[in-house]
Amino acid sequence: MHEDILSLTPRLSRREFAMTTLAAGFALSTQPVAAETITTDATGLAAGEVKIPVKDGTVPAYRAAPDKGGPFPVVIVVQEIFGVHEHIKDVCRRLAKLGYLAIAPEMYARQGDVSKLELQDIISKVVSKVPDTQVMSDLDATVEWAKKSGNGDTAKLGITGFCWGGRVVWLYAAHNPALKAGVAWYGRLSGAGKATDLQPKYPIDLAGEIKAPVLGLYGEKDTGIPVKDVEAMREALKKADKPGEIVVYPDAPHAFHADYRPSYRKAAADDGWKRLLEWFKKNGVA
């Protein structure tokens, strides 16, 4: 009888949710942290970890917003390949200081904690197992959480993401018709040789389905995203008559916004951030 009752009780196993709380500090594979690392304090903010209800449990997320007033425009911040570590939390605080409710859900919560893994293990053991359908569903749940919190105005909804999250921005702009604008930082555009059953489509495959204007920010020296892919995406958006803009920084490598890494390029990062804020304001996320 006891076993029958247990079998009827919904439970989450460690396999289903490998992460129940966010990692602290910077991811191991990004160490050592650079001297230029920007640190934004939480003065005047309500900031910290929250739980996002999803269809099969809860996902940990970091959120930051002004501690007075509201509701505030909502910006979802999508993590790099390294998960929601300190840099992504800091980006949330930067946006909160400017009057946004910024929230970064941990997209790998079911698949594993990448904060203590080396890069190749992150890719092979975790990221390769994260379905795009799960990511889209969790982002939808994040929007719903912001709406129900009473602190977020989801009629003014934006999204930004970096690296792995840059690709996700494009996908979400094709997924959610309620999105007002997106800003994708050096997200992979083409899946040539990389598409899988779990991640079947890339931004260039979805150009005709984009529902919100996306600003793409890319580096000419990015060895993983060739300029020809960027030009192809530009052409695909134009052909589909979709709103969007792509900026390529001549001397910038991949991850040029990541101030805690050697790839950081201050001029490109600062210009990209300025463009992000202007893009959001122009498209109703302000």
Image: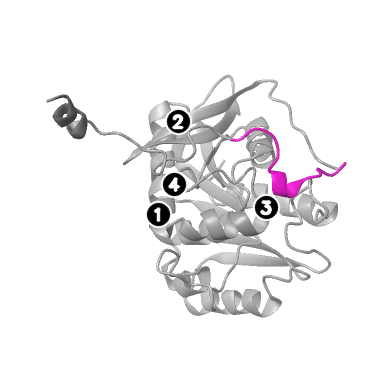
Q: Position of residue 40 (x, y in %)?
A: 74, 31
Disc 1 designates what residue? 176
Q: CA distance from mark 2 to mark 4?
A: 13 Å
Compared across the picture, whether 152 is left or right of 260 comes to: left
Q: Are marks 2 and 1 in contact (CB under 8 Å)?
A: no
Residue at screen point 47% across, 48% down:
111
Q: Position of residue 196 (x, y in %)?
A: 45, 70
Disc 4 designates what residue? 139
Q: CA distance from mark 3 to mark 1?
A: 33 Å
Q: Are marks 4 and 1 in contact (CB under 8 Å)?
A: yes
Query: Which circle's residue, 3 or 1, is located before the other in the chain?
Result: 3
Of marks 4 and 3, the one in the foreground:
3
- The quadrant in which the N terminus is found is top left
Start-end of magenta stretch: 23-35
Q: Are marks 3 and 2 in contact (CB under 8 Å)?
A: no
Query: Which circle's residue, 4 or 3, is located before the other in the chain?
Result: 3
The numbered disc on residue 118 is: 3
Of marks 3 and 1, the one in the foreground:
3
Q: Amino acid at mark 1?
A: Asn
Q: Position of residue 198 (x, y in %)?
A: 42, 63
Q: Amino acid at mark 2?
A: Lys
- The quadrant in which the C terminus is found is top right
The numbered disc on residue 281 is: none
Of marks 2 and 1, the one in the foreground:
2
Residue at screen point 68% across, 24% down:
42
